[in-house]
Image: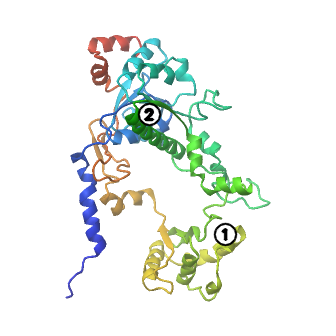
Amino acid sequence: MADYKRAKWADWADHVKSLDDPAKNFEKPEALDDLVVIDVSSRSMAGCYCSSLLAELGAETIRIEPPGGDLVRTYSPGGIMNKDTGLAYLQEGRNKFHVTLDLEKEEGREIFKSLIGQADIVIETYPAGQMDEWGIGYEELSKLNPRLIFTSISPFGQFGPESDRKQFDYDNVAQARSGIQYQTGEFLTEGKTYDDMPWAVPTKAGPWIAWCVGGAFAAVGILAAVHYRELTGEGQAIDVTSAEAYERLNDYALHWYGDQGHITERFGSLDTALWLYGFFPTSDGGVFLGGLRLEMWKAFVDILGKYDEWGADEWTTLAPFMKEDWQFKYQAMINPLTSQFTSQELTRKSIEYAKTGRLAPITPVVAEIVSPWQTMHDNNWIERGMFTPVQDPEYGSVVCAQAQWKSTETPPRTKWVCRPVGADNGHIYLKYLGYGPVMLEKLKGQGVL
């Protein structure tokens, strides 16, 4: 029997894993453990997502909710609740200390100001100008703490024609106003109406992507501001809108309009900037195929056994295939062919073609479209710790997406998934303001906590 020869990539994988194995995260330091973050966001997952990123990196994050809890705690499919908390907030309450404070009361705002003196970062998502009206906006707070980084996430920004609308930041508004939702969805055939094709409508992306993008960009802005503060000692205000953040992902469509005046219309999963690129059916579901280069498109035609019949050897440019009518034409020709195979069979064909095909190592990209159940049971993601359950003292064993990136020295981590409303009032108010049980009871009786 021939000796087994270990692949070189396996040695490399073992080496990298030894450096950034998520199972060893708790043995390593946290990058932001010297920062104090106050998340006073309201009704918006953008603020919660932003503070989650900072909390995963070790920042002591204090989540302030109104007495009774913030509205985001109720966001949950089917109204399912784990104790007082919906499933969505279990994802974004991670690693945060939860306290209550009524900012609509003068005494609540005074307590908030007292906390600010010991904070590095504030994250808020109230309508533009609301914090200023309460006397706890950036100008007022920066007088108390010149090093403060004050981050606002709002629907239309802190200035601009619509900044005074007093509207909270909502994901559906951000998606709709970004321009991306208009061009996302199935193609509406010319001459047809929505009555004829009720599915061919502008389609929102998955769960709260605009909120997530807005929160992510806010976190990037905060980290840049922290670096600047290290150099100058000065804090600053950061102004983010979820719509602008999401619009940043609009990629070529924005430039196509700016350069050519072209408005990108809905085109299903096809894309007039690329070919081969889109969903194609299989006998057990479907795959997403990517060609991206002329040679990759030719390789796929070869895999289907149509290289000579379709004259692929004579193709010299991808340009014609990016036209809508050509894409519809070839999609109709490809669908019956891919439907003869399972998703895994097509994937294996691409892998084998890269080894022995006419154009090898060039091959198309074939991605099997899988269900959430398959994703969460995928050995690749399990090995990388993406869905390792968190044993939370309050909410039990909870599976949530974690370890979004790996790091050899200061990796992010999930220490707990959430806290009940006001669970950390005693700890936080004693630590930062010296309030004991008697004071807490008094404030609670007054409706301040």
At a point 32% along the width and 15% down the height, the residue shown is 440
Look at discs 2 and 1 and give the one toward the viewer: 1
Residue identifier under label 1: 322
Residue 192: mark in rendering: none
Element marked by disc 2: helix
At a point 67% along the width and 72% down the height, the residue shown is 319
Is 415 rendered above or below residue 323? above
Instruction: Please give left or right for residue 387 compared with residue 272 in the image.
Output: left
Is residue 253 in sight in this rendering? yes
Instruction: Please give left or right for residue 188 compared with residue 5 in the image.
Output: right
- Residue 424 is situated, as x and y percent measured from the top left of the image, at 31, 26
Residue 73: mark in rendering: 2
- What is the quadrant of residue 225 in the picture? top left
Nearer to us in this view, 142 or 429:
142
- Residue 180 is situated, as x and y percent measured from the top left of the image, at 62, 50
Specify the amino acid type for callout 1: Met
Is 46 rendered above or below residue 360? above
Which colour scheme appears in the figure?
A: rainbow
- Residue 96 is situated, as x and y percent measured from the top left of the image, at 35, 34
- Residue 317 is situated, as x and y percent measured from the top left of the image, at 64, 77
Sequence-first disc among 2 and 1: 2
Specify the amino acid type for callout 2: Arg
